[in-house]
Image (tube, grey):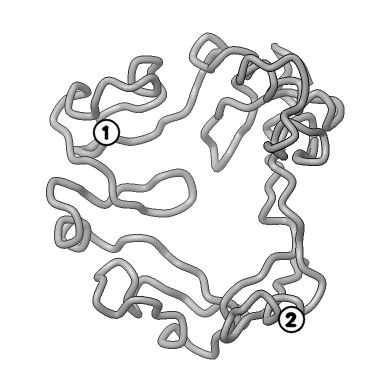
Amino acid sequence: MREGSTGADAEPAQADLAHCASACSSAADCVSDPSSRLYDQDNYACNDGECVHLGCNSDVECAAVAPNTVCRLDLDSPRCTDACVELSDCGDGERVDSGLIECVEGGCTYVGCSTDAQCPASSKCIWAHDGIRDCAFPCDTADDCAQHAQEELGLTGPDPNDPFTHPEGFVCLQGICFGNVPGCTSDAECLGLGWEAAVCHMPE
């Protein structure tokens, strides 16, 4: 997929890979830090025996954990973000300067890209994620992804100490580079990683 393509409207996602997750029979089993208002029972759901963190529930919840933050939708779930009245309240980083972040309804919100010019060098505005286009490296093979990474770091070849400068560190899905995160094959494999209660979630 190259500049000008619109094929990214069909969203690829690494969530489609089998992955380890905390096992549960109810949301109460998922609570990891009962002292934190962002990680108590009302912030979780138990879906098909797998714990799913739902994000924040309110501005009050966020402010109790980090002052001057609010709860706003960020891509696929609500998260705590800096409160704002105008864009300057969101800082002066590259994502703000390029228009990827805006002040929306009192919260600094990632709104995605609309043109390649907003993206870092070598990346393109091609990935549609929950209706928001994002910057990503285009590819035909994992070799393309490794080359992009090397260029970003000013390298002329792979770094033996950095797996994300080698083709094996990436997977090319629907023309977009993703980090190659190995999936699980069984519950026993997840438990072997030291989890107290874990399941290998197999997507349908």
* Residue sitting nearer the eye, 94 or 129: 94
Disc 2 to disc 1, C-alpha distance:
42 Å
Could you say which is closer to the camera, residue 105 or residue 151? 151
- In the image, residue 57 sits, relative to residue 158, either above or below, namely below
Q: Quick one: quadrant of the N terminus?
A: top right
Numbered-mark total: 2
Q: Earlier in the sequence, mark 2 or mark 1?
A: 1
Q: Nearer the viewer, residue 174 or 197?
A: 197
- Residue at mark 2: 187
Q: Residue at x 57, y 85 (%)?
A: 196
Tell me the quadrant of the picture where the C terminus can be found. bottom right
Residue shown at the point (55%, 42%) measured from the top left: 130
Q: Which residue is mark 1?
A: 104
Q: Position of residue 197 (x, y in %)?
A: 59, 86
Three-letter amino acid code at disc 1? Val
189 or 110, which is in the foreground? Answer: 189
Q: Secondary structure at mark 1?
A: strand
Q: Position of residue 125 (x, y in %)?
A: 59, 21
Amino acid under label 2?
Answer: Asp
